[in-house]
């Protein structure tokens, strides 16, 4: 819905937007979900009925205004309906990460005092039951998929469809209460509570109001001219603020359709069938797509490899300029059109990007090489900078002003300032209300004037007005010689290579930088198979001499690139090792959104860090790991520590404070 759309008076809640959408777009598609290979479709009118039935059923179960209701499951219309039904009766939805272990769920459930939970299947039911005795006042659980649950005690356990049936049966008795609660909602009513990723401690509950979500959604939709006919593909965790703003906030503001995949395994094929016009992914997703492309090309014929390399080189040269409407010669345009026919078009179709009109990446900084690769294909991929506490949007890149090294200009109605230490602050209509039951953290993050400390360091480019992020404030430091240490800058360059899944740089206060690297098992495993190299485990492949040689060549290439930036040239890597295990959220080394817990990793593997700095050629280590079933174990390995060529450069000195 744009500025020229009908009046928006009274649209002060997501349920109010639902009523508006029924009036304007009642017969238009609101949701799709693929089930048993067939796309199921619900219109806005049908969606309203599903939400109303569930809301009445929750009233029948005893849900009171202000109650917290946990939502645990994959992207399905049923859970998006549940969030709006919960809001409609004055309660608060609390989406949670479905891959969380029971112990992690226990913290969130206990912290918010959830009395109810709506979950996906037997796996999630079992997790909640495991920790239920530790929860004060927990009353009822609702599940969507009944498989495996027939013999469970159903005195406090209910099937989703049955709750809806009971709501419909009690329509005459409860509809007035339902409407009364829905009509009481205001801009200041709580819309959702989302938990932070917890990179530096226990996750905190971020309380977001209707004002936060609706104003942020409205401004973002107008910024990118999103309309009812757009399509979004919902596949990212529902507990993440990005999915909430795209699949609830913007979907309900603009009235566009939300498409849910059949399963995690079918995301790629389902996305190809839908062809979303509005798409979001964190850098890790784009990295994975690029890895898959490179693996396919390695298996292709010599002619196809030559054709790919020839046209991709041309795309890199002129693709971004064509996308931005800049001047490009007729011959270059013709060659690019041929590339679109033979390479770019089929490749975009394979990735599901054929119809993408607006694409965003955020959550972590994206490597410039990776960013330029997608832009060169003609995909309007842009960067935005946001946080849960901002209802996502802090800055975004306008069309025609897209750069790999910045995250754009302030989003509509957002104010920015940089303090003396370089930390970024913002305030906007999207600024969160509070951290739930945590006034100290609220006060330390948001001041009385509404300015929020991001924890990120950066600066505003004087010429363009764009914001450039350097790194997390807590991660930015100085090497012993006073030059800047900004690990993310180097790590993102390393992760451009399909062989490298993750990298962690160390060097703050030291005389040089060293790094841990995780190989990408899919990419390196494919290489091993093509070269008839047998391996039995990730650990064995990670320590193979030819793998280490390849990784070393990548590190040295990155060093050459880093040396070209006088401000950050001191961040070149002097020594590295390939870890014997993948960094894993279950082992506490990453968050559920795949952000590295740097301090935890450094402490856990301190023997390896010390070995790199001591110049040891190899080191023996034993590490505790968590298996998929929750059991603990340990793995031992002897790791090779490698020296790397460093490009001579005079690092820019940073004055001591």
Image (cartoon, rainbow, N blue to C red):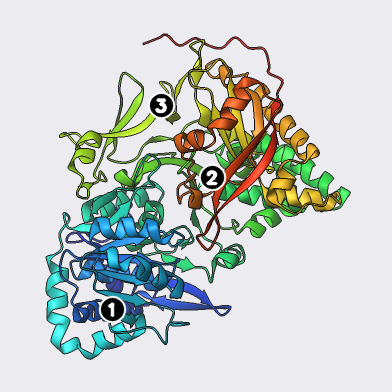
Residue 329 in sight in this render? no
Name the residue tied to disc 1: 54
Give the vertical position of 311 relative to 180 (above or below): above
Pointer 2 or 1: first along the chain: 1
Furthest residue toward bottom: 169
Task: Return the x and y of residue 587 as percentages of the image width and height.
Answer: 50, 49
Instruction: Determine the residue positioned at 57% across, 31% down.
Output: 607
The C terminus: image quadrant = top left
Q: How crowded is mark 1: few (under 14 residues within 10 Å), some or many (20 or more)?
A: many
Task: Return the x and y of residue 375 as percentages of the image width and height.
Answer: 59, 42
Instruction: Determine the residue positioned at 19% across, 87% down.
Output: 171
Viewer-nearest residue: 170 or 94: 94
Question: Distance between the Cα atoms at labels 1 and 3?
Answer: 46 Å
The N terminus: image quadrant = bottom left
Task: Return the x and y of residue 405 as percentages of the image width and height.
Answer: 51, 30
Pointer 2 or 3: first along the chain: 2
Instruction: Determine the residue positioned at 73% across, 40% down.
Output: 543
Name the residue tied to disc 3: 458
Label of residue 283 in the image:
2
């Amino acid at each position: 819905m744009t500025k020229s759309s009908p009046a928006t008076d009274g649209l002060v809640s997501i349920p109010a937007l639902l009523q508006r959408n029924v009036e304007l777009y009642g017969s238009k598609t609101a949701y799709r979900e693929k089930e048993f290979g067939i796309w199921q479709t619900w219109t806005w009118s049908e969606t309203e009925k599903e939400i109303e039935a569930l809301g009445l059923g929750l009233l029948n179960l005893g849900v009171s205004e202000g109650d917290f209701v946990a939502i645990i499951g994959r992207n399905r219309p049923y859970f998006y309906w549940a969030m709006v039904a919960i809001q409609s009766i004055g309660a608060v939805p609390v989406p949670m990460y479905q891959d969380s272990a029971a112990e992690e769920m226990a913290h969130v459930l206990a912290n918010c005092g959830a009395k109810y939970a709506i979950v996906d299947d037997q796996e999630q039911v079992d997790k909640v039951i495991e920790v239920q005795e530790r929860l004060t006042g927990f009353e009822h659980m609702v599940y969507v998929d009944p498989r495996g649950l027939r013999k469970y005690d159903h005195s406090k356990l209910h099937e989703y469809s049955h709750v809806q049936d009971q709501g419909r049966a009690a329509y005459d008795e409860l509809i007035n209460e339902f409407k009364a609660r829905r009509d009481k909602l205001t801009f200041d009513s709580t819309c959702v509570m989302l938990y932070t990723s917890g990179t530096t401690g226990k996750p905190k509950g971020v309380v977001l109001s209707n004002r936060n979500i609706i104003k942020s959604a409205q401004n973002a939709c107008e910024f990118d001219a999103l309309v009812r006919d757009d399509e979004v593909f919902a596949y990212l965790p529902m507990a993440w603020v990005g999915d909430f703003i795209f699949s609830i906030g913007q979907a309900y503001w603009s009235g566009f359709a939300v498409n849910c995949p059949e399963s995690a395994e079918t995301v790629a094929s389902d996305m190809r069938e839908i062809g979303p016009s509005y798409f979001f992914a964190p850098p890790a997703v784009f990295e994975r797509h690029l890895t898959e492309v490179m693996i396919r090309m390695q298996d292709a014929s010599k002619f196809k490899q030559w054709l790919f390399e020839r046209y991709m080189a041309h795309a890199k040269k002129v693709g971004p300029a064509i996308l931005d409407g800049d001047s490009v010669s007729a011959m270059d345009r013709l060659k690019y059109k041929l590339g679109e026919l033979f390479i770019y078009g089929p490749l975009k179709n394979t990735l599901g990007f054929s119809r993408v009109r607006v694409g965003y990446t955020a959550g972590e900084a994206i490597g410039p090489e990776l960013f330029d690769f997608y832009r060169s294909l003609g995909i309007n991929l842009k960067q935005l900078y946001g946080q849960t506490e901002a209802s996502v949007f802090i800055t975004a890149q306008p069309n025609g002003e897209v750069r790999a090294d910045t995250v754009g200009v302030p989003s509509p109605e957002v104010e920015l300032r940089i303090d003396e230490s370089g930390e970024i602050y913002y305030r906007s209509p999207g600024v969160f209300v509070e951290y739930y039951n945590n006034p100290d953290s609220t006060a330390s993050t948001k001041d009385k004037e509404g300015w929020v400390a991001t924890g990120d360091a950066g600066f505003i480019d004087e010429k363009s007005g764009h914001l450039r992020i350097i790194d997390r404030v807590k991660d930015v430091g100085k090497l012993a010689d006073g030059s800047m240490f900004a690990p993310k800058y180097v790590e993102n360059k390393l992760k451009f290579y399909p062989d490298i899944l993750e990298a962690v740089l160390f060097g703050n206060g030291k005389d040089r930088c060293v790094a841990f690297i995780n190989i990408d098992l899919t990419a390196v495993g494919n290489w091993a198979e093509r070269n008839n190299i047998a391996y039995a485990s990730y650990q064995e492949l990670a320590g193979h001499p030819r793998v280490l040689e390849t990784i070393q060549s990548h590190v040295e290439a990155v060093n050459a690139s880093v040396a070209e930036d006088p401000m950050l040239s001191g961040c070149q890597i002097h020594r590295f090792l390939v870890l014997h295990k993948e960094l894993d959220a279950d082992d506490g080394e990453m968050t559920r959104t795949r952000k590295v817990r740097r301090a935890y990793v450094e402490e856990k593997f301190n023997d390896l860090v010390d070995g790199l700095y001591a110049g040891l050629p190899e080191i023996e280590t034993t590490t505790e790991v968590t298996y998929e079933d929750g059991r603990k174990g340990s793995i031992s390995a002897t790791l090779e520590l490698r020296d790397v060529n460093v490009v001579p450069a005079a690092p820019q000195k940073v004055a001591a404070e």
